[in-house]
Amino acid sequence: MNSELEVLHCYRTFYPESQGGVEQVILEIARKTEKCGVLTLADSPRSLKLNDHLPVIAKKRWFSIASCCIGPGLLGALYQTKAKLLHFHFPWPFGDLSYFLAGRSRPLIVTYHSDIVRQRLLGALYRPLMHRFLARADRIIATSHNYLESSPVLAAYRDKVKVIPLGVSEHGYPEPSDKTMEGLEMQFGRGFMLFVGVLRYYKGLEYLVRAAANQPYRVVIAGNGPEASRLKSLAAQLGATNVHFAGFVSDEEKVALMELCRAVVFPSHLRSEAFGVTLIEGLMNSKPLISCEIGTGTSFVNQDGETGYVVRPADPIALREAMENLWSDSVKAEEMGRAGRCRYERLFTADKMAEAHHQLYREVLMERGLVD
């Protein structure tokens, strides 16, 4: 199967070991693109075999530094693969280095998911490699015009940047069973505010917990991550008994939670959050959104006053006001949810995203003389 590959996605983590937004997007594109595969690292490489005939080449992850996964076995796999075009997902410094050492100068597309925000010292050391990598790319994909306009890094490569919004396919989600729906409704009720995602530092969940404390509605935080213990301690300290930590949820449970909730809250407060696939899932499920203005694609997905509210980042009071508005006005919430569904169908389906990628792949391969 590897010998037939035409496009190979390269990223530091992948399904099912890691289930973040980037992994989901790669999965959507790869499933809808012929002769497409994935090269990644994993703690347990054998666990990354999917059941839909998508070729996944997984090598052992040795360790991670500042979210940069490292595994030397990736180099040999990258060199040996016969894929015509390599599609790397940025940022991943070890991926950049791997391309130069083992990519064999093949056509390169880079999806620029985020600026490097937190690791400033390491970012300064990495900058020369980063610019060499981006300069080498045949095309750079930005996920929104918002991010393209606000990123100083992307500004230097504007002439080869292509904007392709992310998308998800509703057909890839399971229909929740009556048992699952009843169990989650018994646990959390209906009409709660919902966050779904990995509990990371840039997700702004501290401000969500502070905003929710002692309010009349429930807030459900679904997901695991490095911030989990700190957030639970904060909720206990504030007496925020209405904040519930659901932990990891399956796709079926996520769909059920989306159906049961009043609104999707996405309080990310730093530019590390470039887009927010959960926001698209909210639109898809006809739910109003609450997000923060951080100059990225989150404000492209969520249109303030139309599909939900966009509020100041790191501001519990602003978050609380937005949640209160949707909690107290169910008619407004439903109107915004319907507008969100229309926006999803117009801009954020997986088919639209995959077709745009397919056209870009053909364009680059034709420029390189690798297809007629």
Image (spheres, helix red, strand yellow):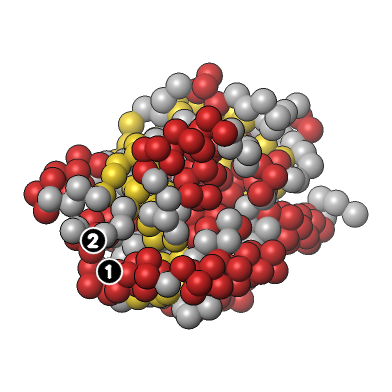
Q: Which mark is residue 224?
A: none
Residue at coordinates 45% horizontally, 53% vertically from top-left? 261
> Dot 1, how many residues are within 10 Å of its Cα: few (below 14), some (14-19), or many (20+)?
some
- The quadrant in which residue 5 appears is top right
- Mark 1 sits on what residue? 320
Quadrant into which the C terminus falls = bottom right
Quadrant showing the N terminus: top right
- Which mark is drawn over residue 215? 2
Residue at 49 percent of width and 54 percent of height = 278
Residue 178 picture location, percent across and down: 57, 34
Q: Nearer the viewer, residue 9 or 79?
A: 9
Left or right for 332, reference 339: left
Q: Residue most toward the right?
A: 372
In percent of width and height, residue 84 lies at: 73, 44
Asked which quadrant contains residue 269, the reply is bottom left
Upstream in sequence: badge 2 or badge 1: 2
Secondary structure beneath disc 1?
Answer: helix
Report x, y in % for residue 368: 77, 57
**Depth order, front residue of 273/340:** 340
Asked which secondary structure carries label 2, the reply is loop
Disc nearest the viewer among 2 and 1 = 2
Q: Which residue shows up at 37% across the image and 66% down it?
A: 327
Q: Does 71 sit above or below residue 240?
A: above
Which residue is located at x 44 percent, y 59 percent? 262
Estimate the spatial distance between the alpha carbons at disc 2 and disc 1, rounded to whole Å.
9 Å
Q: Horizontally, is 215 left or right of 89 in the view?
A: left
Frontmost residue, 363 versus 136: 363
Query: Taking the image as drawn, is residue 199 in sight?
Result: yes
Q: Are marks 2 and 1 in contact (CB under 8 Å)?
A: yes
**Amino acid at the residue labelled 2:** Gln
- The spot of residue 363 in percent (x, y) is 78, 61
Amino acid type assigned to the residue bearing label 1 in the image: Arg
